[in-house]
Amino acid sequence: MTLKNEVGFLEVICGCMFSGKTEELLRVLKRSFISKQKILVFKHASDIRYSTQEICSHNGQKISAHLVESTSEIFKYDLSEIDVIGIDEVQFFNESVIEDIEKLLAKKIRVVAAGLDLDYRKKPFGYMPHLLAMANKITKLTAICAQCSNDAFYSQRLNNINQLVLVGATDSYEPRCALHHYVPEDKIK
Ligand SMILES: [Zn+2]
């Protein structure tokens, strides 16, 4: 017998690339798993860098995840016994993510969502601002600037490929502090 959630709860884990968001998501989910809560994990289907069935952090930890193109697909699963839902790469989901998470919270499910708060231009990513406003708990992580070792809040794009985020392309991005971050397009002008 496990303790049931009295109410829904939304935790958002955010930060730049290489800030350890997926590690933190895995840590939180592992705690729920140890306390015998029933967990389902989802991830945006665009991210197939390591596996179609598992979410892996940069340090190699993994957990099974269902790949979905929209968070509305979560409701195709039997949620009647589910206590906790993890969502990785949440910044990639379309606007239904807001309503879908509200529905999960109404079912007294604890939702833990991890994603980029800012894109490489330092602009808010997708529906993250809305999710951060809705959140009951926010964990904002930093990385270490690849140039000076100060706290890094931003994802530096290292090439000019015309795509908002190259998923997990570790050689295309590095973490940077405010002093060392720049937007490639601005430099060309
Ligand atoms: Zn720096």
Image (cartoon, rainbow, N blue to C red):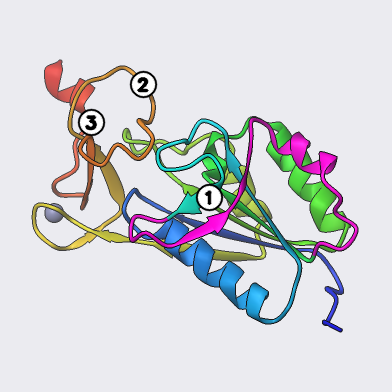
Q: Which residue is mark 3?
A: 183
Q: Judge: label 2 CB < 8 Å from ligand 1.
A: no
Tag 3–tag 1 contact (CB < 8 Å): no
Instruction: In this rendered view, identify the residue nearer to me: 61 or 7.
Output: 61
Amino acid of disc 3? Val
Residue 72 drawn above or below residue 116:
above
Magenta stretch, residue numbers: 57-82
Q: Which mark is residue 168?
A: none
Q: Is residue 37 left or right of residue 108?
A: left
Question: For the residues carrying marks 3 and 1, which lies nearer the camera in this image?
Answer: 1
Instruction: In this rendered view, identify the residue nearer to me: 188 or 146.
Output: 146
Marks 3 and 1 sit apart, C-alpha to C-alpha, by 32 Å
Q: Is residue 137 left or right of residue 179?
A: right
Q: Identify the secondary structure beneath mark 3.
A: loop
Q: Residue at x 28, y 59 (%)?
A: 143
Tag 2–tag 1 contact (CB < 8 Å): no
Residue 151 figure quarter: bottom left
Residue 119 drawn above or below residue 7:
above
Q: Which quadrant of the render holds ligand 1?
A: bottom left
Amino acid of disc 1? Glu
Q: Residue at x 64, y 80 (%)?
A: 34
Residue 113 figure quarter: bottom right
Amino acid of disc 2? Gln
| Upstream in sequence: badge 3 or badge 1 | 1
Marks 2 and 1 sit apart, C-alpha to C-alpha, by 24 Å
Q: Which residue is mark 1?
A: 54
Q: Identify the secondary structure beneath mark 2.
A: loop
Q: Which mark is residue 163?
A: 2
